[in-house]
Amino acid sequence: MSIIPALQWRYATKKMNGEKVSQDKVNSILEAARLAPTSSGLQPFEMIVITNQALKEKIKALAFNQTQLTDCSHLVIFAAWNYYDINRINYYFDYYEKERDLPKGFSDNYKNNVTKQLTSMSLEHQFEHASRQVYIALGMALTEAGALEVDSIPMEGFINHEVDKLLNLEEKGLKSVVILPIGYRDAENDWQAELKKVRKTATDMITCID
């Protein structure tokens, strides 16, 4: 089953019509992000799903008043760990061992190596590393949305620290990275809806070395 038709169908929706996306489709989009691969399997991010209209209005004001933020059905905030806390890493490996029925401490050597490598970076680089894992999950969510013919648009154009403050993310050890409104396109009022998708050619982008 190819995902190419879904990727050809989707575009950066500029206008949404406010129609609600069914919960089962929302769950599938979030599940695709949850199942995404991440470095060492740590999944160093969380997703905050917002349907409260008043809260969406507040976020819109922090995102240059982009209308998709309030006209969407669900607003998903992807927030990465602010740094690689040892307790979070231990929690993951404890869970990993439990889920695979492994003896406690089975993965200690690997865990210790991962912990040493990640925590040796500066706090800024730790957050950058965690943020890169977000974008893998984001791609999965975008693709699943397209496969379900649900519109979505990834947004980095917002005041991150103000959104963090609004959602109390700092208290959770998180920082916002990207916002994903999901909903349905308002094709009649979206100037991009009928435009040809433009991407570089494969020749421009792909180099094969035999």
Image (spheres, helix red, strand yellow):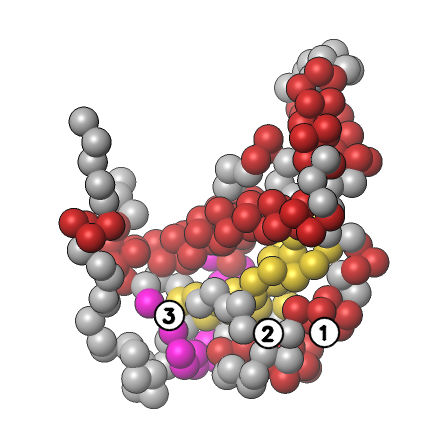
- As for residue 73 lying within the magenta part, the answer is no
Relative to residue 113, is residue 184 drawn left or right? left
Percent x, y of residue 140: 44, 49
**Which numbered disc, 3 or 2, marks the residue that appears first in the sequence?**
3
Q: Nearer the viewer, residue 175 or 68?
A: 175
Q: Residues within 10 Å of mark 3 (few under 14, many from 20)?
A: some
Q: Secondary structure at mark 2?
A: loop
Most foreground residue, 164 or 17: 164
Can residue 60 be seen? yes
Q: Dot 1, how many residues are within 10 Å of its Cα: few (below 14), some (14-19), or many (20+)?
A: some
Q: Quadrant of residue 176?
A: bottom right
> Residue 123: percent from the left, percent from the top?
73, 48
Amino acid type for the residue under numbered disc 1: Glu
Mark closer to the observer (3, 2): 2
Picture residue at 68% right of the left edge, 77% below the top? 55
- Packing grade of label 2 (10 A; few <14, some 14-19, many >=20) is many
Q: Quadrant of the N terminus?
A: top left
Is residue 97 visible from the viewing direction of this image?
no
Disc 2 residue type (three-letter)? Phe
Q: Residue at x 67, y 19 (%)?
A: 110
**Is 182 situated above or below 90?**
below
Q: Which mark is residue 158?
A: 2
Q: Which residues are magenta?
A: 11-25
Looking at the image, is mark 1 or mark 3 earlier in the sequence? 3
Q: Is residue 64 left or right of residue 193?
A: right
Circle 3 sits on which residue? Answer: 12
CA gap, disc 1 and disc 3 = 24 Å
Three-letter code, disc 3: Ala
Image marks 3 and 2: residues in contact by CB distance under 8 Å: no
Residue 121 image point, x, y percent = 69, 40
